[in-house]
Image (cartoon, rainbow, N blue to C red):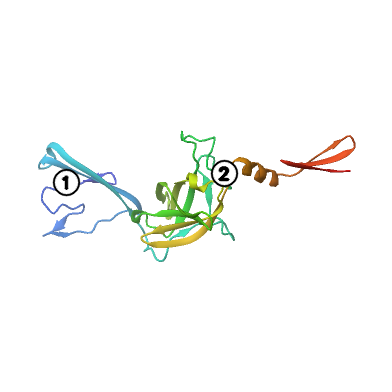
Amino acid sequence: MQHAGQDRTENLAPFSLAGDTDGAFHPANFPVGTNTLTVTAYSQANLGGIPVASSTISFEVLDQAVNGPPIILTQENSDRAVAINAATFTVGPFSLFTENNFNPDRRTRLILFATNLQVSAGATIFAENATLGSVSLPIEFIGVVPDFNWLTQIKVTLPDRLADAGDVWLRLVSSGVSSNQARITIKPSGVAAMIWSSLNEPPRWTVVRGVMRGRRLPWQFEVN
């Protein structure tokens, strides 16, 4: 058995990482955070012969019990989720696709953060609003943030069903328990994106033959 860089050899059942007395397991000490244990069976005692089977598991050790529902982190004094584009490290609003992206599909991935979540229990994240209903977001990664064992990082992909969704509420479910809701905004696409962009950029003013012209694409107006 291998754990935390140390090896232990067991020849008789029951096999235990910390040994046993007449079948009663001795307690083992594990560091807080993610641990990995590898067990390899050999054809003969004392690691003799050849390896015949091997298995590796990872598990999480917490320094406190998980009490209450999981919590999606939000910005201070806001209902907006602490969410960043995994490729550009920028905050929202988010498009479904990101050009500067190492993933060949160019699809946007978001990094979210949660507390009070036991990683080994698994999790599902939903995006919801009145028009969209409830859409499950594919989770590509979930794990404890190094040196911050109380904080969990979650990477999700934005699916096509979120196109033009606007504000959506994220909700995390783990072991049947639902989290708080945290808001993100999805940018509109196509013509809607042009209108959205024009409404969110400052007006540009030009003087043409004595006429003051203000432009907010795709509209323009004149003031004589």
User: Which residue is found at the position 34% from the left and 54% from the top?
Assistant: 120
Q: Quadrant of the C terminus?
A: top right
Near-viewer residue (145 or 75): 75
Asked if residue 26 can be seen in this view, the reply is: yes
- The residue mark sitting in front, 1 or 2, is 2
Q: Amino acid at mark 2?
A: Thr
Q: Does any portion of residue 149 appear in the rendered image?
A: no
Numbered label attached to residue 90: 2
Image height of 53 relative to 31, above or below = above
Name the spot of residue 67 as percent of width and height, x first.
Answer: 39, 66
The image shows residue 121 at horizontal and vertical percentages of: 34, 56
Please state which amino acid type lies under the numbered disc 1: Thr
Residue carrying label 1: 9
Splitting the image into 4 quarters, where does residue 20 fall?
Answer: bottom left
Q: CA distance from mark 1 to mark 2?
A: 49 Å
The foreground one among 186 and 148 is 186
* Secondary structure at numbered mark 1: loop
- Mark carried by residue 129: none
